[in-house]
Image (cartoon, rainbow, N blue to C red):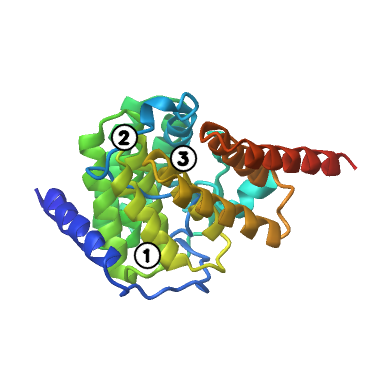
Amino acid sequence: MFLRQSGSLLRRRLRYLLSTNTITTTTKTTISSLSSYPPPSNAGFLHHNGPEIPRWQKLHWDSSLWILLSGQAAIILGASGNLAFADDVSAEARTGAGEDGSSDLQRVEDGSVISNIHTSKWRVFTDKARDFFLEGKLVEAEKLFLSAVEEAKEGFGKSDPHVAAALNNLAELYRVKKDFAKAEPLYLEAVHILEESFGLGDIRVAASLHNLGQFYIVQRKLEEAHNCYEIKRRVLGQNHTDYANTMYHLGTVKYLQGKENDSVALIQDSIKILEESGLGQSVACLRRLRYLAQVFLKSNRLSEAENVQRKILHIREMSKV
């Protein structure tokens, strides 16, 4: 009951914040410990119950988007106390992971000084649950993730960021199991805890909103997803390394909503940021160019599609040099 109530309040708060300019950004935040929670991952945020999606049935290639998002990893904690989260744009650009459905997990050291029997159990349960999760043994993983949540609450306190991470782990498992009714309040409670701890304008809250957005887009709840991405964009600011990634995801959502011009502008901005950052020949940039070319083709904007395809070929040729 508490999770449902807090989830409802948070959804209303997100809608309110989207209509105001009250978010204070923290784009220069340096995250080095679990007590500071993870930096944002590469996914985005979204919502449904909104406008019609007139092109949905016309996209024979859009299913890859849902497969991509359902395949990405969220936040998983190991016994070492390290925090793993989905690949951010810098890792994606370096390795090419992320947009093809793979997960390139990064780690953040746990700087927590709290240590007691409950925190020790939390680490053990989380580590074992992670292993089961990665092995596809979801029943066993669920039991341990549930135990990890309880131990985190006992060991760190119910409003501690460790609890938010534990809730997110459990929510991710339910998302994979397609038990969306159980997953949503857990994601929302994780966001609520982090907002209370750091403020909605904090980069750690943006990371949690990103996971919530992925959850919504898997369900094709595009308005909810859009809202999450939009807030994340405001939090990060244009100079953040993850900004281009957020723009791309927001652009794909705009396209699925039938807002073609907005979609093209966002995806082009995403590509421009990567190019200006020296990542114009990265795998991530090539994927976005291919997506943009498909958008143009579907819209019968053939000359623009051809220009993008020429650019892709040029990048491939340059990469062989």
Q: Which amino acid does the dot numbered 2 rest on?
A: Gln
Name the residue: 75% across, 39% down: 310
Q: Position of residue 36 (x, y in %)?
A: 43, 66
SS category of the residue bearing label 1: loop
- Between the C-alphas of marks 1 and 2, the distance is 38 Å
Q: Is residue 196 left or right of residue 103?
A: left
- Between the C-alphas of marks 3 and 2, the distance is 16 Å
For disc 3, the neighbor class at 10 Å (few under 14, some 14 to 19, many from 20) is: many
> The C terminus is located in which quarter?
top right
Q: Is residue 237 visible?
A: yes
Q: Which residue is mark 3?
A: 73
Q: Position of residue 205 (x, y in %)?
A: 37, 62
Q: Is residue 118 left or right of residue 1?
A: right
Q: Which residue is mark 2?
A: 219
Query: Is 314 or 282 nearer to us in this picture?
Result: 314
- Between the C-alphas of marks 1 and 3, the distance is 27 Å
